[in-house]
Each structure stands twice: as C-alpha cells, then as structure tokens.
Image (cartoon, rainbow, N blue to C red):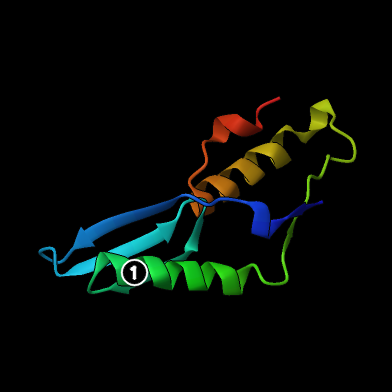
Amino acid sequence: MTSVEQQNYQVLITRENGNAVWRAVVLGIPALSAQAESREEVIEQIRAKLGDALQWAEIITVTPAAPGNGNQPARDKLAAMVGSTMGFSKMILKP
C-alpha cells in the first residue's frame, strides 16, 4: 500500500480564452480540474481539489486473476474504456 500523500502528481496548466483564464488538469485524472484568473490561484485550487479527492484514497496494485488466451475480447474492451477515459494507449494492455 502506498500513501497518496507521498505521491507527486503532474498537472497541465494552460492559458485559455485569450489568456484571460488559467486552467489546470491533473494528468491521468481528467475529472480533477480547476480554472482561475491567475496561475497562482489555479495552482492553489488544483492542489486543494487533489487533496480533497485523495483524502480517503490509497494506491494499490492489482494482478488479474487468470490471464488466458481467451481474454482478448475483454482486454480490448478494457483498453477502449481506459483509453477513452484516461488517455492511455491501447498498447499498454497487450500481453
């Protein structure tokens, strides 16, 4: 078990709407995002949101129960789900 407080998270910070709005998105967790009028403010907002979201979280590693040759359709479906929601390539799930 790894404590989430010990983890570092990469955050993409961009300027939008003619540079009037700063936006921050935690890479790999697109649901965690923030908008503000200044860079400092958006960093503080995303730091607070990440802390709130991870307050009761832990990071674990899970191994599949039985990898078999018949799992390719399930593996493809999982790759499509992960790829569409988290931006990962389908290639990470190939045996």
Residues 76 and 90: in front is: 90
Please provide percent x and percent y for residue 64. Answer: 83, 40
Label 1: few (<14), some or many (≥20) within 10 Å? many
Q: Residue furthest left?
A: 18
Quarter holding the C terminus? Answer: top right
Q: Dot 1 corresponds to which residue? A: 42
Q: Give coordinates of residue 79: x percent, y percent.
A: 61, 41
Of residue 90 and residue 62, the one placed in the foreground of this image is 62
Instruction: Identify which residue is drawn at 38% across, 65% down.
Output: 43
Question: Looking at the image, which residue is at 48% across and 46% down?
Answer: 87
Relative to 55, say whether 26 is above or below. above
- Name the residue located 66 percent from the left edge and 53 percent from the top edge: 6
Left or right: residue 23 compared with residue 7 = left
Q: Residue at x 41, y 73 (%)?
A: 45
The image quadrant that residue 38 belongs to is bottom left
Q: Residue furthest right?
A: 65
In the foreground, 84 or 10: 10
Count how many numbered circles sit on residues in the image: 1
Is residue 1 found left or right of 83 in the rendered image? right
Report x, y in % for residue 80. 56, 45
- SS label for mark 1: helix
Which amino acid type is shown beneath numbered disc 1? Answer: Val
Q: Would residue 18 be found to the left or right of residue 41 on screen?
A: left
Vertical arrangement, residue 3 with respect to residue 74, above or below: below
User: Residue 71: where, in percent of width, then height?
Assistant: 78, 35
